[in-house]
Image (spheres, rainbow, N blue to C red):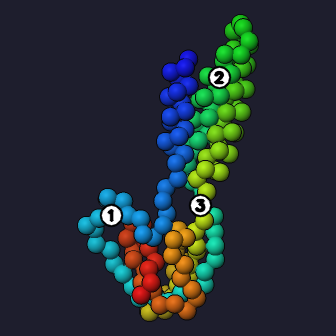
Amino acid sequence: MKKIIGIAFATVTLVCCQADINSNQYGTSSVGRAASASHCSVISVRQVQVKSDNNAGMLAGAILGGVGGYAIGSGKTAHNLGAAGGALLGGYAGDKAQGALSSQTGYEYVVRLDNGQVMTLTQGSDVLLSPGQQCMILLGNPARLIAY
C-alpha cells in the first residue's frame, strides 16, 4: 500500500510541474533548428494567465484517492464505495492542485508584420514589450517574440 501511494505521489509531482514558457528558455530539441523570422511592431499587450491543459493531476489524484478510499471500512461493499468516493474526490483535488501549481503569468501580444499581416503570440513574462516597439517574431516551435 505504501509503495502504491509513493508511486502515485511521485507521478503527481512529476506531471504537475509547470513548463517554463519564458522566451529565453529553449529545450534541447530546439537547438540547431532554423526558424523563419519577420520584422514586426507591437500593436497591443495584455497580461494573461497560462494554465496547463492536460489531465495528469486529475488522473493521479483519482488513482491515489481510489487506493486510499479502498482502505476505508471493512467488507467488499465498503471497500468499493470508499474506492469510488476516493477516486472522485481525489480526481477533483488533483485537478485543482495541478491548476494552482501550473498557473503562470504571461503576455499576449498582437503584432503587425511589415507586410501588414496581424498575428498574436502568447509567451512568458520574462520580457515585456510595449505597444509601438519594433520586434522580431521567430516562427519556430515554439514561436517567440523578441526585441529588435
Q: Judge the density around disc 3: few (<14), some (14-19), many (≥20) Cα neighbours within 10 Å.
A: some
Q: Residue at x 66, y 36 (%)?
A: 91
Asked where in the image residue 90 lies, by quadrant, the reply is top right
Q: Quadrant where the N terminus lies?
A: top right
Residue picked out by circle 1: 30
Horizontal and vertical percent position of residue 74 = 72, 8
> Which of the two labelled residues, at mark 3 and mark 1, occupies the earlier sequence position?
1
Figure check: 20 above or below 69: below
Is residue 35 at least partly visible in the picture?
A: yes
Counting residues from the N terminus, which is met first, the one under dot 3 or under dot 2?
Answer: 2
Secondary structure beneath label 3: strand
Alpha-carbon span between mark 2 and mark 1:
41 Å
Q: Is residue 54 above or below residue 128?
A: above
- Number of numbered discs overlaid on the protein picture: 3
Q: Which residue is mark 3?
A: 104
Sequence-first disc among 2 and 1: 1
Asked if 133 appears above or below 142 in the picture, the reply is: below
Which residue type does callout 2 highlight? Gly
For marks 3 and 2, give the CA distance.
Answer: 31 Å
Amino acid carrying mark 3 in the image: Gln
Q: Which residue is painted at 73% across and 19% down in the image?
A: 81
Q: Is residue 123 visible?
A: no
Rounded to the nearest angstrom, the CA distance separating label 3 from label 1 is 22 Å
The kind of secondary structure element at disc 1 is helix
Residue identifier under label 2: 68
